[in-house]
Image (spheres, grey):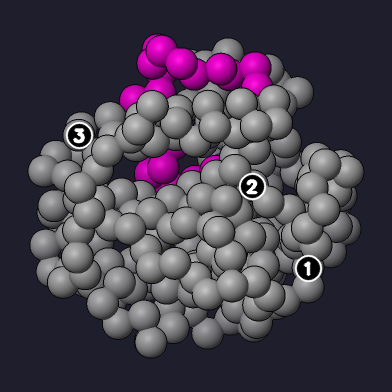
Amino acid sequence: MPGGPAAPPILYSFPTNDQLIDSLSQFVVKVQKDAIDKKGRFTIALSGGSLPKQLRGLIGRPGVKWDKWQVYYADERAVPLDHPDSNHNLCTTEFYSKTSIPPGNIHTIDPTLLNDLEELADSYERQLIVQFASKDSARFPVFDLILLGMGPDGHTASLFPGHELLQEEDRWVAYIEDSPKPPPKRITLTYPVINHASKVAFVAAGEGKQDILHTVLDRPEEGLPSSRVRPVSTGQLFWFSDDAAAQKTEYPRSEFGVSA
């Protein structure tokens, strides 16, 4: 992977999930403000799972400039946009419907291409090229922020343990047709894209994440997919956890604070 050495992850752990949600929203607003001040737009990639609910702290928060958001997906299932398994459907229900993000700023997969996974991935990659290639000179897109969740097996986005996609170094968007977690057909951002983001933040909450968070942060040499997220060069990696999830984790905590 090109670029300088990765900075160590920053772990924030909060006594309650409500405090996590509030702090995460403060963090997102600060990243958004810096991005808009610098280039007039805020590029963000979202995941599914529990993450959209964890963004509820942004609803009604001062300083959010929804019209400047350009939203993409870290991964998406190859299903219709209104399907229960669709990350877009989940984000719409839990998040977008409560915001004023312009629909044209939410970048979905092309639902006419669901039967051709390679073309579905290529089509989504072209959407990224339109947003980034003419504005950023890097070989890979540089998102302002990518928000990720983590599965009980340590997977993130649709990058699963032991899968060949963990070795992908060239494509921006790849497809998977044998996901160990249903539905089997998906597209996902690849590590080169995730690791070129300016900031990446994982959100992990609840007792059910204790063992896997401990493994990912304390034993990264095991190479689980979430451990392989290490932004290059000037990129930064953050973990937002509650104390329940971080109970077994020995990795040092940092004190949360957002400067103006």
Task: Report the span colored magenta.
Answer: 46-69
Is the residue under label 1 in contact with that under label 3 (CB below 8 Å)?
A: no
Inspect the image, locate mark 1, and give the three-letter code of the amino acid beneath it.
Arg
Note whether 6 is above or below 206 in the view shown.
Answer: below
Residue 165: x and y, percent? Answer: 65, 76
Judge depth for marks 3 and 2 and give the one in front: 2
115 displayed left or right of 195: right
Inspect the image, locate mark 2, and give the three-letter code of the amino acid beneath it.
Phe
Q: Quadrant of the N terminus?
A: bottom right
Mark earlier in primary sequence (3, 1): 3
Toward which corner of the image does residue 234 lie, by quadrant? bottom right
Disc 3 crowd, CA 10 A, few/some/many (<14, 14-19, 20+): some
Residue 107: x and y, percent? Answer: 72, 36
Is the residue under label 2 in contact with that under label 3 (CB below 8 Å)?
A: no
Q: Nearer the viewer, residue 191 or 49?
A: 191
Q: Dot 1 lies on which element?
A: loop
Q: Dot 2 lies on which element?
A: loop
Mark earlier in primary sequence (3, 2): 3
Disc number at residue 171?
A: 1
Q: Tell me how far mark 2 sits from mark 1, CA to CA.
A: 16 Å
Identify residue for label 3. Answer: 19
Judge depth for marks 2 and 1 and give the one in front: 2
